[in-house]
Image (spheres, helix red, strand yellow):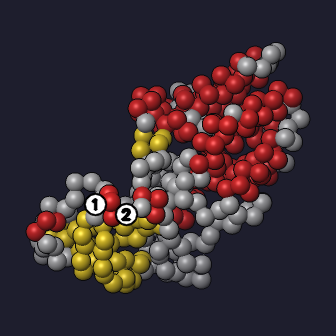
Amino acid sequence: MRTDSRGVPYLSATLVDRTGSIDARMWRLPPELKDGLDGPEYVYVEGNAHEYRGMLQLKIERMRVLGPGEVDEEDYLPATERDRKSLADEVVETGFSFEDPYLGELFTRIVDDEGLWEAFCAAPAAKTMHHARIGGLLEHSVHCMRLAKEIAELYPVNRDLLLFGVIFHDIGKTRELSWGGGGFAYTTVGRLQGHVVLGDRIVAAKVAEIPGFPEDLALHLSHIMLSHQGEKEYGSPEQPKTLEALLVNLVDNLDARTAMFVETTKNVSPGGWSHHENPLRRALHVPEGTDEGGGAMEDAPGA
């Protein structure tokens, strides 16, 4: 609930279904909405879409809160529009190209763990920040993988270690987040330990299954997992201190922030500005001559 410059109350809302989201406002409020809503609700709305300061917005004329029996929850759970099988196949093909036998075996054990691999291909990459959709973790990981392949041609890195790191740096989100019941939420273990620690433990458990796995390689791999957030205030126990760890952090941040921009400006017309209530915490501009929504992230290899 907010008030305008005249002190008139109105409802500021974001409407979401599996196809995306749109900013909305409601001015003529019925008595039951005078105090807003306690939390996310399924609603039926009628209204008119219009452009406000270069951004698509919905003016709600009527809104009714729906009961659970009136909706199919899957219709409201955002999901990637990419072909998840194709994305997963691309990851598998990359993993099978590893020259390091231990990283190759580690990769195979993760993919062969049916429950873990299924969760990795279905999980969102975040609750709200970026790639917050079914298959979002897989989508984010593939983008990072494609970027890392190009970077590996430029710098003196351990290519297999870098690629393993960018693919599985967020694997802890398979346990940090839940994605049933019509929305995304943090699990209890996710709240108590976070995806950084959970991801390191998942990988360490698989490493322990492989006879003779080099201690030095396991240490460097663990450092990547524990430092990929970059700074302690962002959840990393340590800052990146190897080239591979630094590049995993930078690639992760690049794709995440780019996704934040693209997702925020999806409904912004060329020449317009987004609202400042977004993960980047600033109004974002789409210049004239740019594809609406800041352009699209293509699903072609090398994009």
Q: Compared to 186, does 82 lie above or below?
A: below
- Answer whether residue 56 is visible to the viewer in this image: yes
Q: Quadrant of the N terminus?
A: bottom left
Mark 1 surroundings: few (<14), some (14-19) or many (≥20) residues within 10 A: few
Q: Determine the CA span between mark 1 and mark 2.
A: 7 Å
Hey, which quadrant is residue 239 in on the image? Answer: top right
Q: Is residue 51 left or right of residue 148?
A: left
Q: Which mark is residue 67?
A: 1
Q: Residue at x 63, y 36 (%)?
A: 116
Looking at this view, name the residue that lies furthest to the front: 69
Instruction: Point out residue 95 in the picture as x, y percentages from the top left corner.
Output: 80, 41
Hey, which quadrant is residue 48 in on the image? Answer: bottom left
- Answer whether residue 151 is visible to the viewer in this image: no
What kind of residue is marked 1? Gly
Q: Compared to 64, does 207 lie above or below?
A: above
Q: Indicate the secondary structure of the residue bearing disc 2.
A: loop
Q: Which mark is residue 71?
A: 2
Q: Nearer the viewer, residue 150 or 103?
A: 103
Looking at this view, name the residue that lies furthest to the right: 99
Q: Nearer the viewer, residue 30 or 158?
A: 30
How many dots with numbers? 2
Q: Which mark is residue 113?
A: none
Hey, which quadrant is residue 191 in on the image? Answer: top left
What kind of residue is marked 2? Val
Q: Residue at x 69, y 33 (%)?
A: 113
Q: Nearer the viewer, residue 118 or 35?
A: 118
Q: Is residue 217 left or right of residue 138?
A: right
